[in-house]
Amino acid sequence: MSAKTVTFSGARTLPAIGQGTWYMGEKASLRKTEADALRAGIDLGLRLIDTAEMYAEGGAEEVVGEAIKGLRDNVYLVSKVYPWNAGGQKGMTACEASLRRLGTDRIDLYLLHWRGGFDLEDTVELMEKLQQQGKIGRWGVSNLDYGDMQELWRVEGGAVCATNQVLYHLASRGIEYDLLPWCQQQAMPVMAYCPLAQAGRLRSGLMNHPVVNEIARDHHATAAQILLAWVISHQGVIAIPKAASVEHVKENAGALDITLTAQDLLKLERAFPAPAHKTPLDVV
């Protein structure tokens, strides 16, 4: 296994590529194929699996539950709570429902999916209660920008937040202006969702860009592998691409063995420069 790893607070050190599950669980006919892909990823060492109660309204969590049967101790399990459930009894009920769908008694890392109606104080209080009850290990957030994180840090207990999961790929580099450097200073991992820009759908032409493909040829790799290798070349960043087939998950895992050269990185920087000023946080 590659040396490219990320360590979450108090957690095992994990490979810098995990497995996402957005859009899984939406079709009953595909659930077995999706679960098989996740199990293949676990076998390949991609031990972090990210899901959410939002994905297929719990359907993705059910797929994950099927995939991790008999393998629970090999998996670092991440799920997310709707913002309208992120406080009080609603949060307790939501977490318990996720646990049932996942077929486990604990979620290793439980995230606020995005800012909502509950105050951050309410969400931190919920997370602390869930920890005390042993239902979650650590907690974190998703889709919070730099200003949100500063606000969270001012909440009592907020600074134990274990991660921020945000959209990040080669053609969406806004977090590099302030959010990513700040998270790196806190030694807090960033989870990059849509690291392939949803196979290029979020940024037309990304997978077919001549510079990306030139570098792919040099490394005897695919464009997707180069895009993943670029994301995880950043300190403390773990990519969570979705792979709904065994072949696809093998391709993702192979990106761990690619080390981009300084020249590669310079070419990509020129083709996709980071913004020189603050930009709104990309969210999908």
Image (cartoon, rainbow, N blue to C red):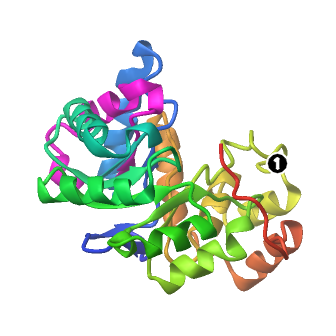
- Vertical order, 166 against 231 (above or below): above
Q: Where is the N terminus found, in terms of image quarters?
A: bottom left
Q: Residue at x 36, y 54 (%)?
A: 123
Q: Please report the bounds of the magenta region as a residue range.
A: 48-75
Looking at the rendered structure, the secondary structure element under dot 1 is: loop
> Observer-nearest residue: 263 or 139?
139
Q: Amino acid at mark 1?
A: Asn
Q: Residue at x 79, y 57 (%)?
A: 213
The magenta stretch spans residue 260: no
Residue that mark 1 sits on: 208
Q: Position of residue 159 (x, y in %)?
A: 39, 75
| Horizontal relation, residue 10 to residue 141: left or right | left
Q: Residue at x 19, y 58 (%)?
A: 131
For the image shown, how many numbered marks are present on the structure? 1
Res 76 visible: no
Q: Residue at x 34, y 60 (%)?
A: 124
Say which quarter of the image contains residue 216: bottom right
| Horizontal relation, residue 161 to residue 20: left or right | left
Residue extending farthest to the top is 29
Q: Position of residue 208 (x, y in %)?
A: 82, 48
Q: Position of residue 97 (x, y in %)?
A: 25, 31
- Vertical order, 116 against 173 (above or below): above
Say which quarter of the image contains residue 100: top left
> Observer-nearest residue: 283 or 169?
283
Say which quarter of the image contains residue 35: top left
